Structure formats: structure tokens, C-alpha cells
Image (spheres, rainbow, N blue to C red):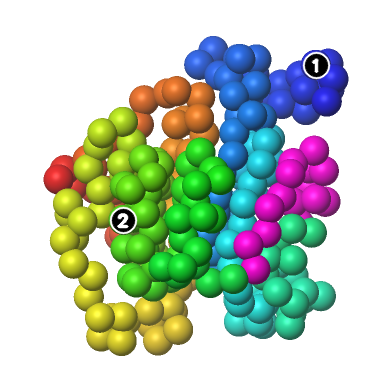
Amino acid sequence: MRQEDIFKRYSRQIFIDEIGLEGQKKIMASKVLVIGAGGLGSPVIQYLAAAGIGTIGIADFDIVELHNLNRQIIHNENEVGALKIKSAERFVNSLNHHIKVIVVEQKIDSNNVSEVLSQFDIIVDGSDNFSTRYLVNDTCIALGKTLVYGSILGFSGQVAVFNHQGSKNLRDIFPEPPFDEEMPDCDSLGVLGALPGIVGSMMALQTLKIITHLSVNLNQLTLIDALSWRFQTLDF
């Protein structure tokens, strides 16, 4: 991509003193894995692609269903029944064809997690179950990878950056995962569609700040209560 085209496309980012052309080059050279192309993954993928991330990995094994469309905004009615990663890949290619997309058409488990995560600089976890979250967290520690974490339910959300520059990780705040079958989820309690947009956008912003070497709050969990419109931080 020619430098004049880079400036034309990303000028509103380059104009920011803390980003500049050098920061944009860092964005374009980065490799980010997004785990999950659902409620959280959708806005993360959307904004990382728009920002010009060089390589975006997308890991998902699910298909697009009609009930996904209230919040999973990179998919549309024509994609119902298609693999989410294929729908996500088509979205990225249509938004920014300069981005390299790596699709992981399998569930992340103990057999493949190290191989998949090792290919990327930053891991963004938009998964919807505790077993995957803890597996990804533990593997990021083993591989020395920064992890951007988020979760949503109803009107509530959480965001944190784990294992970055020696910072703490998921087990430092929640040492052991609960049993998934005991926990409420979006399938049982629902989620208002705009909430994943808020939380996913925050995750994407944290990712871009990390890539451009800007400061992010570490050892801190941000709690979002969209019903009462309260944002709190919990130090751990």
C-alpha cells in the first residue's frame, strides 16, 4: 500500500499526536487473533479491520443463526446458516481488502491452542464459556502473549488486559473457573444488542493502544452496568 494511500485512508488516526504515521505502521504490521466471531468478536473485528491491522486471525466453529443478528453486526441475513468465520472473512475483505485474514475453522482446545496462539502478537478473547477463557488465559501466560479480555451478559460487561508487560492475569482475580452449566449465559438471560458493541469497542481500543505502545490500565477490571449507566474499576 502506497504511503499516500495509507495517509488518505487512515488520516484521522495519523492526525492523533500519540499515533502518527509511525503508530499507523505499527498497526499495519501487527498480528491479532480474535477468538469468537460473535457478540464481542463482531465489533472487535470490525474496528480492528477499519484501523488497518495487518493480520487478523479469527477463530470460531459456529454457524450464523437468526438470533445472532441483534448483536453480531458483521453478519447479515444472507449469512444465516454459514460458518461465522467465513462470514467474518467476507466482512473484513469487503471493508479492507489490504488485511490478511487467517481463519481457524476449529474449536480452540488443549490440542491446538498453543499452535494457534503462537502465530499472533496479541490475543483478544471474545469467547462465551469459561473453559475456553481459562485455557486461553493459561496459554497466553505460557507463551508470553498479551490477552485482551471481555465478557457480557444482559446489561453488564467486563473488560481487562491480562499478562501485559508482567501484569496479572485472569486467575489472579478469579483463581478457578465456575462450572459452565451452573452459570447464566446469553442463551438463558439474553443480552441487549448494543452492549457487546460497547464492550467490544473498548476491547478493540485497548488492543490498538497496546499495539501503538500507549499506556493501558493494568491489574484492573472495568465493570460496565449499562442499565444504570455506571462504569467502575476494580483493582486486583
**Identity of the residue drawn at 23% across and 70% down:** 177
Left or right of 235 on screen, residue 212: right
Q: Residues within 10 Å of mark 2 (few under 14, many from 20)?
A: some
SS label for mark 1: helix
| Residue 51: percent from left, percent from top | 65, 36
In terms of depth relative to the viewer, which is nearer, 201 or 194?
A: 201
Above-or-below relation of 186 to 38: below
In terms of depth relative to the viewer, which is nearer, 109 or 215?
A: 109
Left or right of 188 on screen, residue 49: right
* Residue 71 belongs to magenta span: no
**To which residue does mark 2 refer?**
138
Amino acid, disc 1: Gln
**Identity of the residue drawn at 25% across and 48% down:** 169
In terms of depth relative to the viewer, which is nearer, 153 or 180?
A: 180
Quadrant of image for the N terminus: top right
SS label for mark 2: helix
Q: Nearer the viewer, mark 1 or mark 2?
A: 2
Q: Residues within 10 Å of mark 1 (few under 14, many from 20)?
A: few
Magenta stretch: give its range: 91-105
| Residue 129: percent from left, percent from top | 39, 73
In terms of depth relative to the viewer, which is nearer, 154 or 205?
A: 205
Find out whether the residues at labels 1 and 2 contact each other: C-beta distance under 8 Å. Answer: no
Can you tell which mark lies on residue 3?
A: 1
Quadrant of image for the C terminus: top left
Amino acid, disc 2: Asp
Q: Can residue 3 be seen here? A: yes
* C-alpha distance separating marks 1 and 2: 39 Å
